[in-house]
Each structure stands twice: as C-alpha cells, then as structure tokens.
Image (spheres, helix red, strand yellow):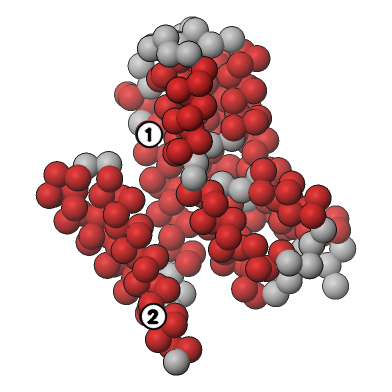
Amino acid sequence: MPTPRSSSFSGIVRASPVVMGYLPLAFAYGVMAHGAHLSLVATLALSFFVYAGSAQFIAVILFAQGLVLLPVVLTTFIVNLRHLLMAASVAPFLARWSLSKRIFFATELTDETFALHSTEFPSGEPIPSHVFAVNLTSHLSWIFGSLLGYQAGGMITDIRPLGLDYALPAMFIGLLIVQLRTRRAVFIALIAGAASLLFRHLGFESRSTLIATVIGATLGMGLELWKKD
C-alpha cells in the first residue's frame, strides 16, 4: 500500500503537465494585471482565492475598464458555474471522505485537475495525499507564475508575440490524449471537435466550444446509458 509520502510525490509528478501549462498562462495573467494597475497583493489574492484562469483574465479586463467590484464578482461567478458540473461528476468517488476534505478538494478543483482526476478516480478509491498533492502543486504553480508575470510586467507591454496564449490549448490537447483510451472516447472527441468547428463556422464564435462541450457530454452520457442497457 502506498505511503502518504510516496503518494504525495506521485501526485506532484502527476501534476507536471498542468504545471507546464499553468506557468506561462499565469505569467500572462500577471503581466496583464500589472498593466491594469492592480497591486501585487490584489493580483496574488485573485490567484489564491479565485484560482480560475478565464475568470481572472476577465476580472483584470473589467478592472481595467474601471468597473466596480459587484459586476466583476457576478461575471466571474457565472463563468465558473461549470465547476458545479465538474464537482458533481467526481463527488461519488469522494463519498467516504470527511466533509472538511471534500470542501478543501472543491476549493482546489479546476478544469485541468478535473481532467486528471476523472481518469484516475474510476480505477480505485482516491488517496487524499495523492489528490491534494496534485491540486496544491497545480495551485502553487499558478500563484508563482502570477508573481513572475507581475514582476516582469514593467518590461513587457504586449504578451502576444511571446505565444503564451498557446499554452492553455496545448495543455488541454495533452490532457485529452491521455483520456482517449477507447474507441468510444475517440469517437466522442471527434464529434465534439467537429461540432466546435461547425458552430464556429456558423458564426457562434466563442460559444461554439460551450455548445460542442454540451453535445459531447450528452453523447457520452447517452452511449454510457445505452451500454448499460
């Protein structure tokens, strides 16, 4: 049986793909936060308490436009509503955990750590030391990247030439490949990808990804129920 120390180390290693994606993305966020004249404390507080890339980028843009706090909070809340679905998906695997552990897990859940956990949890009961090592390593890398970006903000005025915007899609491609273990998974991924391209071509722009996600998730659930019958 794995010891807590070995489980923690395996969790740190497991989080390495997320870390490599988070560092450049958080760096870009830190540069943007500096450009929006947020203080270092506010910049790191967002990374510590909010810990959601898309919501933090949106918050920085809204702060830069001079909006008050309430619209920023409401916007980030709506953007992060998808976390309810992710938490509901993994909750059955954590039924034997204490309430405090489940709350701590929920505060650290992101799209990327969810992708990792969803491939591991079905294989057996989650080991807390391993799971928390994955989550904390990912979170700390996000905070560290935010700090580096903020410190470099005075020297960098435009992050686009650095190609940092490719870090997130590259990371998700890697996480997707890990989950393509069956022909059914490959089929669902192809359908979702085709749907995203189709709806983007039809003029739905950023909403195409959301629509494709709903289609892929619905198709996956339908195939799973059909298989059980």
Q: Which mark is residue 130?
A: none
From where the camera sits, is residue 66 visible? yes
Mark 1 lies on a secondary structure that is helix
Going from N to C along the chain, the mark reached first, 2 or 1, is 1
Q: Where residue 185 appears, x then y in whole percent?
A: 40, 73
Vertical comparison of 192 with 78: above or below: below
* Rendered residue at 81%/50% (across/down): 100
Residue at coordinates 53% horizontally, 11% vertically from top-left? Answer: 38
Residue 8 visible (yes or no): no
Element type where label 2 sits in the image? helix
Residue pointed to by mark 2 = 223
Q: Residue 12 appears at what percent x and percent y?
A: 70, 50
Residue at (66, 44) in percent of width and height = 108
Three-letter amino acid code of the residue under disc 1: Asp
Residue furthest toward the bottom? 229
Residue 210 place in picture, x, y as percent: 33, 51
Q: Residue at x 61, y 48 (%)?
A: 109
In the picture of the structure, the residue carrying the numbered disc 1 is: 165
Characterize the local packing of mark 1: few (<14), some (14-19) or many (20 or more) Cα atoms within 10 angstroms.
Answer: some
Estimate the x, y position of residue 56 in percent, counting from the top left. Answer: 50, 28
Disc 2 marks which amino acid?
A: Leu
Q: Is residue 193 above or below residue 161?
A: below
Q: Residues within 10 Å of mark 2 (few under 14, many from 20)?
A: some
Q: Is the residue 7 above or below the residue 169 in the image?
A: below
